[in-house]
Image: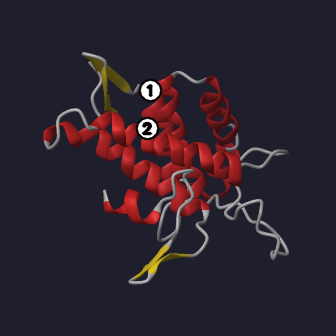
Amino acid sequence: EWLWAEMIETAGDIFPVAYPEGPVGVGTLNDYAFTAEAFLALASRVKLFAQGSAERWVNRAKVIVDRAIEKFLDSEKPGFFLTARDQDDLIVRKKDWHDNAIPSANAGMLHALSSLAAIFGEERYREIYQEIVDLYPALISNVSSAASHGMAAIVRDLTGIAVVRANGVEHLYPDLIE
């Protein structure tokens, strides 16, 4: 709750740094991808702690992913840039494809897009997901060890993501297919 209340604006913009005076900075794709992933993971398990709150976390992840699409998605080629399109003080905008000490932001977006496509059935999530997935054979053939998080998203998507709707409330279970 603190993260949502203090570090994320209503429109979905994320501040990456918190100071006692308040949050500051401009979020990168890492901030958006991993926050959305965390919210979706929380939604899939939150029923153990707070009945009925899964929908809140899924909707928050959707707000963040929608904002990431608006700010970071390359309109010409597949994938997301690491920096927002409105940052005009850059010489070049880089795309993050390789897992290093942390997974790549594009791989994080694969996880979030796959989950949201399963939950909401919106074709735009599936289309963006597939465009990025289509790049993975070349990535794997070049540096397979740097693609594990993206490959995990692809495998999870191919094996299925169960969305259980009970009494109008959705529950996301990426680890359990019945």
User: Which residue sits at x=57%, y=58%?
Assistant: 13
Residue 31 seen by the camera? yes
Q: Which mark is residue 178?
A: none
Quadrant of res 49: top left
Question: With 78 as the anchor, is 133 left or right in this view?
Answer: left
Query: Label 2 is placed on what type of residue?
Result: Asn
Quarter of the figure with the N terminus: bottom left
Q: Position of residue 12 (x, y in %)?
A: 54, 52
Q: In the visual, does 136 lie left or right of 20?
A: right
Q: Quick one: 148 or 164, which is closer to the camera?
A: 164
**Mark 1 or mark 2, earlier in chain:** 2
Can I make out residue 145 in this image? no
Residue at (81, 76) in percent of width and height: 89
Quick one: which residue is furthest to the left in this view?
48
Instruction: Sort mark 2 into few (<14), some (14-19) or many (20+) by Cα contacts within 10 Å.
Output: some
User: Helix or strand or loop: what does disc 1 sit on?
Assistant: helix
Judging by the rendered image, the residue that carries numbered circle 1 is 119
Comparing labels 1 and 2, the label whose residue is closer to the camera: 2
Q: Which numbered tag is attached to residue 59?
A: 2
Quarter of the rendering occupied by the C terminus: top left
- The local secondary structure at tag 2 comes to helix
Q: Is residue 172 above or below residue 78?
A: above
